[in-house]
Amino acid sequence: MPGTLIYAEVQKGEIKKGSLEITSKAKGFGGEVSVCIIGSGVEALAPELAKYGADKIYVVDAPDYENYVTEAYVQAFAQVAEQVKPSVVLASATAQGKDLTPAIAARLNTGAISDCVDLTKNGDKLVAKRPMYAGKAYAMVEAAADPQVISVRPNSFAAAETAGAGAVEKVAVSLDASKIKVVVKSLELAQSDEPDQTEAEIIVSGGRGMKGPENFKMLEDLAKLFGPTATTGASRAAVDAGWRGHAYQVGQTGKTVSPNLYIACGISGAIQHMAGMGTSKVIVAINKDAEAPIFTKADYGVVDDLFNVVPALINEIKKIKG
């Protein structure tokens, strides 16, 4: 198929895992895989993209792009797209990707398909699978116009190392500063050694059944036993009660996640919560209410008090790990 251009997102000096996932996925579709990386001091990251299938890496590296500002990044990416003339534009459906892709589509006079969980090839087109109606159904969407602009939910694909040609080209773009109406004064990043919920492979979440903020320590202990790719989450009820910060909230008004394993502890399963975690590969629910809606979505369910189950699970994992 004709070429693909991918937006590679950088945060804390590293390329986000979701960008590597879509790069390796695009490599499997054939055609030239180009990647655009934008920022300040990002040129050194280009070889990492080649490991995951990038044939050509376009680097926009200048002090103007130290912080993400929509209009500045749209101008830069659109100029690279005009040079590459791709048939497909891909980005990870992170907060930044969801902000950027509609603006890119508007600039390129095409449509955008957002927050997809799978891509399949149909001739020279891609068919995108995206959740609808709070995850109750899926739509198979194919763009009528080129380029197809698609954002893909993190953890939808494996980030498989497949070497690409990796040719690097530094691009000097012209920035129209008069159109930039926003200036980033400061950036406050959460200080945590846990992965972001949107990129975590395992999430242990707690809801109203946790009874208080002090009991989330138990979930943190369980997550740590699963290793560095695991983190904790919370339902809206737990966040509204002040037991956890909003950064931990999973759901329609929080973060949308697709981990390999999602463990829901004391979460009843309100529709807005299940909309945010319904595409998890395996869902385990622990709840003493056998009628809780979460069990309709769960692959495995434990009907018992979480304060009996979670400590026992922690002890068993410790025994296995020795």
Image (cartoon, helix red, strand yellow):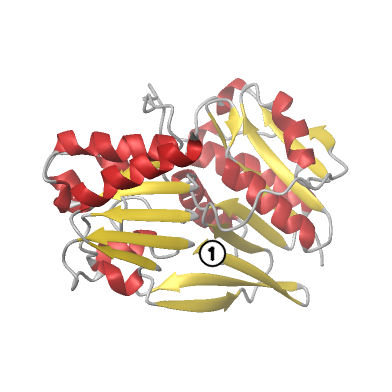
- Is residue 282 in view from this perspective? yes
From this view, report whether residue 277 is shown above or below residue 169: below
Q: Residue at x 49, y 37 (%)?
A: 321
Please, what secondary structure does the residue beneath circle 1 have?
loop
From this view, report whether residue 192 is shown above or below residue 86: above
Q: Position of residue 267 (x, y in %)?
A: 22, 57
From this view, report whether residue 302 is shown above or below residue 98: below
The residue that disc 1 covers is 117
Q: Residue at x 74, y 63 (%)?
A: 87
Task: Give 5 or 83, whichever is nearer the viewer.
Answer: 5
What's the residue type where badge 1 is placed?
Val
Q: Position of residue 243 (x, y in %)?
A: 16, 39
Q: Position of residue 256 (x, y in %)?
A: 39, 55
Q: Which quadrant of the structure image shows residue 150? A: bottom right
From this view, report whether residue 53 is shown above or below residue 276: above
Looking at the rendering, in which quadrant would you find the N terminus?
A: bottom right
